[in-house]
């Protein structure tokens, strides 16, 4: 069986390597020629995923993995087509289907009879059947009869991809019963995790969105608790730890904001789905508003200590939206940069995963932590491992007066030992 994986990003390439590791012939498709050339040399362009480089090299050496920019030809030669490309929203929550629609049009041009098409790209409820199927049928083939169609959402996370592929159950929902059966059969062969069939592609779509909205709401509750504790002079971390001593309580820790392709994006899919049937998902909407507002709230914490930001030098630690992952999509650090600059601060950013040019592209000044410039404050925006052991004596020597822990992971006593004011999110 030959598998075509369309989209060789942080999720697509690990999937392709996983399928190849099970002995399947895999063709990876991507529009980026440099990515394709790198993979064909046996070199992963994604460096932060443990085990990926070795799997890619082994698969290419064994002749089980290749890459191409010719998606139509790859689809023609494949029995299974797995689509994992971005579906994003704009600032108003409107869905941009440009990429996924374009890829689906391309797949239709090469689709063969009896093929299985799988969407791992997270979609709004009903899109597999009502949007993607009609585009695929431009091939002249009839969905559910001439080819099989499944929605099986990715349930993974960058940096721990292969752990998740082993341990997180795989949901499979087809356009009809036979499609579901084919999907379950495929994933049963390429994954080690449990495969769970659901009644339809709509059920699988909804399950993924329910999961993401639930997570986003839980984060928002923690962030509201943080704002309450800040106003009352309480320590939110202490209180959450105490509350969670009850086994029925699972409160998350608050933070500087929510970034990435999942939590800030997918709730908008379900909000739109609900609006289409006259339901107002007010809690989901409120959660999005709270979480999007956390960078501004974090800046307000710093302002209470510094007073004015005019001509103040502020260092942001971390540009990525999540620790140890080189990805900036909707990163709270970007919002911090904009808010601080708007308030008159001189903004520096350190993130060892990014180059000087990449950092300056976001409107901040580059810092390698050895900058001779004096600093007035530091904001920890990203939970990179390297920030767990900061040299606060050196930061004090640079003039740092305030340290804002945007991830609530640094030991308060260590910071205050050097005469630096410590403020966490909700730790007044």
Image (cartoon, rainbow, N blue to C red):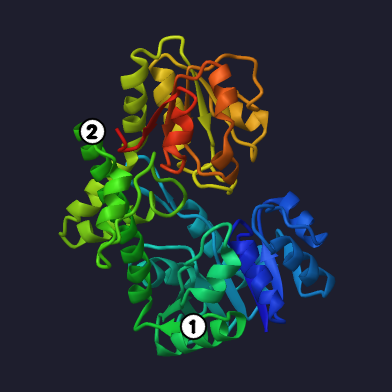
**Which SS class for mark 2?**
loop
Q: Nearer the viewer, residue 278 or 208?
A: 208
Q: Where does the image place residue 192, in percent across and percent down from the top left?
A: 57, 81
The residue carrying mark 2 is: 233
Q: Callout 1: 10 Å neighbours few (<14), some, many (20+)?
A: some
Quadrant containing the C terminus is top left
Nearer to us in this view, 346 or 400: 400
Which of discs 2 and 1 lies nearer the camera? The answer is 2
| Identity of the residue drawn at 32% across and 69% down | 206
Q: Residue 368 lies in what quarter of the image?
A: top right
**Label 2 crowd (10 A; few <14 / some 14-19 / many >=20):** few
Vertical relation: 118 (above or below) 89: below
Q: Is residue 170 above or below residue 328?
A: below
Q: Quadrant of residue 269?
A: bottom left
Earlier-in-chain disc, 2 versus 1: 1
As drawn, which residue projects farthest toward the top?
311
Residue 146 appears in the figure: no
Of residues 374 and 300, the one drawn nearer to the viewer in this rendering: 374
Q: Quadrant of the N terminus?
A: bottom right
Q: Would you say residue 383 is visible in this rendering?
A: yes
Number of residue marks = 2
Q: Residue at x 66, y 28 (%)?
A: 356
Which of the 4 quarters of the picture holds residue 38? bottom right
Q: Which residue is mark 1?
A: 194
Circle 1 sits in a helix, a strand or a loop, which is it?
A: loop
Circles 2 and 1 in contact, beta carbons < 8 Å: no
Q: Position of residue 163 (x, y in %)?
A: 57, 69
Left-right relation of 357 to 207 = right
Residue 262 at x, y percent in the picture: 43, 55
Percent across and percent down for residue 183 are 50, 83
Vertical position of residue 261 compared to residue 387: above or below: below
Query: Distance between the Cα atoms at labels 2 and 1?
Result: 47 Å
């Amino acid at each position: 069986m030959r598998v075509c994986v369309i989209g060789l990003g942080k999720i697509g390439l690990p999937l392709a390597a996983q399928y190849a590791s099970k002995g399947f012939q895999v063709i990876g498709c991507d529009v980026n020629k440099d990515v394709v050339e790198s993979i064909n040399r046996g070199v992963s362009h994604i460096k932060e995923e443990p085990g990926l480089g070795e799997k890619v090299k082994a698969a290419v050496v064994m002749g089980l993995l290749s890459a191409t920019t010719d998606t139509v030809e790859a689809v023609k030669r494949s029995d299974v087509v797995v689509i994992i490309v971005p579906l994003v929203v704009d600032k108003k929550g409107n869905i941009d289907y440009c990429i996924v629609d374009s890829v689906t049009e391309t797949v239709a041009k090469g689709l063969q009879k009896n093929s299985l098409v799988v969407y791992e790209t997270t979609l709004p409820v009903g899109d597999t059947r009502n949007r993607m199927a009609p585009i695929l049928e431009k091939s002249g083939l009839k969905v559910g009869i001439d080819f099989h169609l499944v929605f099986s959402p990715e349930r993974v996370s960058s940096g721990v991809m292969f752990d998740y592929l082993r341990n997180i159950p795989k949901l499979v929902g087809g356009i009809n019963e036979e499609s579901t059966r084919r999907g379950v059969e495929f994933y049963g062969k390429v994954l080690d995790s449990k495969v769970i069939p659901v009644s339809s592609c709509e059920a699988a779509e909804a399950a993924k969105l329910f999961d993401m909205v639930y997570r986003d709401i839980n984060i928002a509750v923690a962030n509201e608790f943080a704002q309450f504790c800040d106003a009352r002079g309480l320590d939110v971390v202490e209180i959450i730890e105490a509350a969670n001593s009850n086994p029925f309580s699972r409160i998350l820790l608050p933070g500087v904001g929510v970034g990435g392709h999942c939590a800030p994006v997918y709730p908008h899919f379900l909000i739109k789905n609900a609006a289409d049937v006259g339901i107002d998902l007010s809690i989901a909407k409120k959660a999005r508003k709270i979480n999007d507002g956390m960078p501004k709230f974090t800046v307000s914490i710093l302002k209470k200590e510094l007073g004015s930001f005019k001509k103040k030098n502020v260092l942001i630690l971390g540009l990525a939206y999540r620790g140890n992952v080189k990805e900036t999509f909707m990163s709270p650090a970007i919002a911090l940069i904009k808010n601080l600059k708007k308030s008159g601060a001189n903004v520096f950013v350190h993130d060892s995963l990014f180059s000087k040019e990449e950092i300056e592209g976001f409107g901040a000044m580059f810092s390698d932590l050895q900058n001779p410039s004096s600093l007035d404050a530091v904001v920890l925006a990203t939970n990179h491992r390297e920030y767990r052991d900061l040299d606060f004596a050196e930061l004090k020597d640079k003039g740092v007066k305030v340290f804002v822990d945007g991830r609530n992971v640094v030991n308060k006593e260590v910071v205050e030992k050097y005469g630096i004011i410590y403020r966490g999110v909700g730790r007044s």
